[in-house]
Image: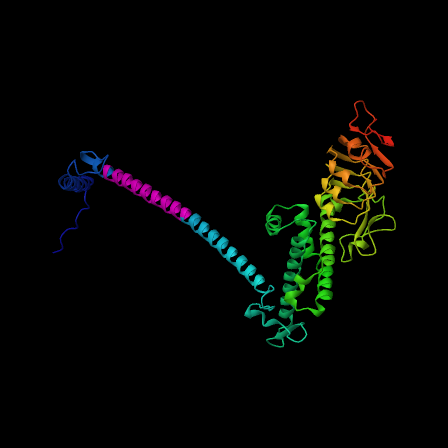
Amino acid sequence: MDSPPRNPPSEAFHAHDLALAEDDANTQVTEGTSDDARPAGLMKSGGGGAMEDIAAAGDDLEKQLDYARQKRKVQRRKNLWMGGIFALLVVLLLVVIISSATAKNKSSKSKSSAVDHGDNSYSTSEDAGSSYSSSSDSGEPMVTSGSSDDESESSSVESDRDVVYVDQLVEYALSKSPSLHMDQNKLDQLLNQPMTPQLQAMEYMTSDDKKYLNALLQTHMSAEPLGEAIQTLSLRQIDTLVERYAVLVLYFSLNGHDWNKSGLRPAIPVLNSESICEWNTVDSGLKCSTDGSLDVIDFTAYELSGTLPTEIGVFKALRVIFLDRNEITGPIPSEIGVLSQLRNLYLDHNQLSGVIPDELTHLDNLLSTRLDNNNLTGNLTKIFCDNHNGINSIEADCFMDPPEVECSCCLSCGGV
């Protein structure tokens, strides 16, 4: 006989089961965890609040773990950042060291191709594929090529050799010139000082003036072994090179790149591969005597500025200096007093200052001088009037009372 169907549980039965389950959970939490062992912030709670406390404690713990993880991430990033900076500094240091080593290596290679005055031989690195040696028969350079496709490298080596020759030629000429009184110590100081007109002149000769100097070398060395050629230059050839150097110093000291910037005067061809005797126009520029010595410096009203260099005393055969009507500043170099052949000295209408040097009294062949319209002081009576019978024209700033320049024999006094 079929048993009657069961009635569905009542709502009271459900509530009873839920209450039992909740009591069991509370009992397990209470027995398994003491007050001291619970996470911070978790307090005893009775009845239905235990589950909420557990959930809240879990959330707090998770937040603390998240905070710790974020802190570790920040620290790792900081460590990576500091490590990156350190690595960059190391790389920069290595680059500097490598660059320095490369520069020294290049310098060493350049020097290795220099003239060996002892055996007159030249050598380059093995990579160049060619070498230079002196011919025992003719004294001409012989080129032996390592392979047929080394022509470009051989040309480069030949160019390096020419640079070495020019460097040695200029240094030798300057050190041997009696006019410059430049020994090796002074030459070293010149090469190691900041950019000056003197250093500019030397760098121009050893870099941009190679065509002229190479032609001179080849002409002179046609019958000489290469290693001996430079040391056998004649005094006249040394003087020619020294005069060229002094002209370049004059050019850079007087800001030659700005000469005649208004274009009102005829353009003078300068800084070319020709002799300085060709740096002129019909009535201006540089002109030489028949033996090639500088005879005339004429740059009247060419908008010159800057100062007169002491190297002007190099031109021992100079007869005429026309540098009037410019904007030249500074003193008159006492070295002008050694120009014993000087006939005309025109420095008027500039901005020269200082005391007129007593050394001008040594200009025994001077016929006329104009020093007026400057800011000069001095005693031309002592320098010229009392000592020179041949001078017939002197002009200076001797008008004021008292005069800026004393001159009892001046033909004309400026300074109005």
Give residue 303's position: percent from left, percent from top.
80, 41
Closest to the observer, 194 or 216:
216
Q: Which residue, as the protein is rendered here, is positioned at the far left?
A: 1
Residue 204 screen position, x and y as percent:
69, 53
Q: Is residue 77 highlighted in magenta?
A: yes
Q: Taken as a whole, is the magenta stretch helix, strand or loop?
A: helix
Q: Left of 160 or right of it: where is 276?
A: right
Residue found 18% across the figure and 40% down from its top: 22
Nearer to the camera, 89 or 5: 89
- Taking the image as shown, residue 48 lies to the left or right of residue 68, namely left
Is 392 left, or right, of 165 in this rendering?
right
Q: How is the image coloured?
A: rainbow
Q: Residue furthest top?
A: 401
Percent x, y of residue 118: 58, 66
Please give the range of residues in magenta. Answer: 53-82
Image quarter for residue 158? Answer: bottom right
Residue in front for this viewpoint, 237 or 147: 237
Tell me the residue at 37%/44% (across/down). Answer: 74
| Residue 359 sits in quarter | top right
Quarter of the figure with the N terminus:
bottom left
**Residue drawn 37% across and 47% down?**
76
Q: Is residue 381 magenta?
A: no
Q: Residue at x 46, y 50 (%)?
A: 88
Image quadrant for the C terminus?
top right
Residue 313 position, x and y percent, is: 73, 45
The number of callouts visible is 0
